[in-house]
Amino acid sequence: MASPRLSLLVLFALHLACKGAPPEPPVAPAPAPANQPQPVDPWQSPPAIATATLQAHLAFLADDAQEGRPPGTAADLRVQDHIQAEMQRIGLLPAFPAGYRQPFTITDGVRPRDGAPSQLRVGGRDLAHAMLPFGHDTFTAGPIEAPLIFVGYGLTADGPGTGDYTGLSERVRGAIVVVLLGAPDDPHRTPASTRPQTKVITARDHGALGVVLVDPEGDLPFHNHGQVSDLQIPVVALTKSQTPPLFAALGARRGLPRPGARSAGKARLATPFTPVVLATANLGGLLPGAGGGRSIVLGAHMDHLGHGTSSSLAPGERAIHNGADDNASGVAVVLALAAAFASIPKESRPFDLIFYAFGAEEMGLLGSKHLVEQLSPEQRAQHLAMLNFDMVGRLRDDALIVAGAGTAQEWPDLLARSAGPLQIRPSDDGYGASDQTSFYEVGIPVLHFFTGPHDDYHRPSDDIERINVDGAARVAEVALRLVGHIMRDRSDLKHIRVAKEAPARSGGFRVSLGTVPDYAAQVDGVKLSGVREGGPAELAGLRAGDIIQRLGDREIHNLDDYMAAFAALKPGVEIAVVIERESAQITLKLTPTAPRSR
């Protein structure tokens, strides 16, 4: 018989066999050789933004040789070539199925029909004139022959007995009205009532058969740019040197005719025209990440105003609008960011990066709108966020405005972590007069980087000499850090609809409806691409995709009708709104509000 001690030893050995041997103590890893570099997170020390690269792109884009980068021109093609060449040099892949470019067409003004010139004949004499992209094509119905009548500024009454048509309604009916551009000094007048298009609509509503717009103070050609709007009444425009025979026919030997003056004979007015259709494109380059399809979009618009359009704030000047800040600065920043991100290893980029240069932004966000409309719902869902850079070349006092900060719940924290030495001045709203709006409307969180307004905006003086290149680089560095945080955190941003009304613009309308028109839509009426959260339109039941066909007493066939209707609307006074929704006509009640002050 075994001794008790031996039995215990045997039992202990069996126990170890069943449980397994005790683990070996951990062995500390051998230190790396002193000359072997330690792994480095590239987002902790992202590459610097090359100011020389920014300067080079600015010098090309804002040069007089690009003639203000108007869409559909040889200069537009040169800009596209420059951007594509840089995308290829950086190593970006084409972002579109057909390559780096996504072609689309725009309408930009009108031209006379072949073999059917326009005409304004007064007293047996043909007067030189300009056609405009609003009015009516008389090719089918033929010329209009009617007496002329002078109605001053052609403004409607804001109160009893104060309009230019007071006492003239019967005399205007069946005549061609002569209308002065502009308006007398009157703080109660709004842009809705003084726009040339509104004056044409007012004349039409009073029974006029045609309109002659007159600028008695200026001799520069009229702008013939933008979408064509059929106002159902022919219109031509005359400058100062062309007015004497017109005014003479109205009985004025010198100066202006008297209000209500009517010609003894008939004038002849014909405007057979056809739209000018131009080809332009969006540019896009893809920097693939390692994560399988989720993406962050960075974009800027590449077009500007050419030699001046109706959007120019220097109406008495015909000169190249180089748009160094608007928006050569944004394109230069996007290209510089593309180069910086391309230097970071792919394995450190879990998300794709897509870089866009949008066309025809100045004509109503047409390029970005076209791009977003071509995305499938699945493709839209792949976009984590869109960062837009528009006018980022005038950094002052280290203050950077960032709009859209309320469109994702993560934005405030990400902006605070990314600001560096700059002071971020955030605003929540995702809507605005730039391309981020097109992405926000389809549920994508957005940010718009902007260094603030200045007196050179939309003027020929927006030149490269006034650009703060170092400041633009610092704006780019904020975006670089912000994207880095998203990459490192592998963040999934949560989209938020912002319940905030748009601020009133200087000299703006006296009412707000909270609507976001789709400027690219070709419909009978005004199609909405969105409505503001908590605004009058949303409270009334309007939504994206609705087509407004009537506001109050006015039929709405186009944006000019829509804007003319604003002149009659008052805050707090309910109106009926007729819309088309999914082929059905619906009437809703809407109460406009006064635009909030800044």
Image: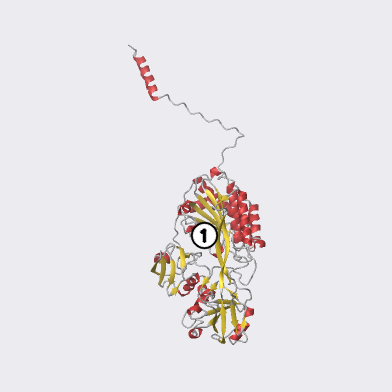
Q: Where is residue 269 in the image (x, y as percent from the top left)?
A: 56, 79
Q: Position of residue 595 (x, y in %)?
A: 47, 68
Relative to 319, does residue 148 appear above or below in the rendering? below
Q: Residue furthest left?
A: 1
Rendering quarter of residue 358: bottom right
> Disc 1 marks which residue?
370
Relative to 254, does residue 82 appear above or below in the rendering? above
Secondary structure beneath label 1? helix
Rendering quarter of residue 35: top right
Residue visible at 56% across and 39% down in the picture: 39
Relative to 121, does residue 85 appear above or below in the rendering? above
Say few, some or many: other residues with alpha carbon within 10 Å of mark 1 (under 14 / 14 to 19 / 20 or more): many
**Pick the front one: 421 or 437:** 437
Residue visible at 56% across and 31% down in the picture: 31
Is residue 474 in sight in this rendering? no
Is residue 228 in sight in this rendering? yes
**Pick the front one: 279 or 579:** 279
Q: Where is residue 303 in the image (x, y as percent from the top left)?
A: 59, 61
Rendering quarter of residue 552: bottom left
Q: What amino acid type should be assigned to the residue bearing mark 1?
A: His
By what rule are the colours in the image chosen? secondary structure
Q: Position of residue 198 (x, y in %)?
A: 51, 75
Q: Which residue lies furthest to the front in this view?
A: 115
**Pick the front one: 397 or 356:** 356
Relative to 597, does residue 331 appear above or below in the rendering? above
| Quadrant where the image shows the N terminus | top left
Q: How many marks?
A: 1
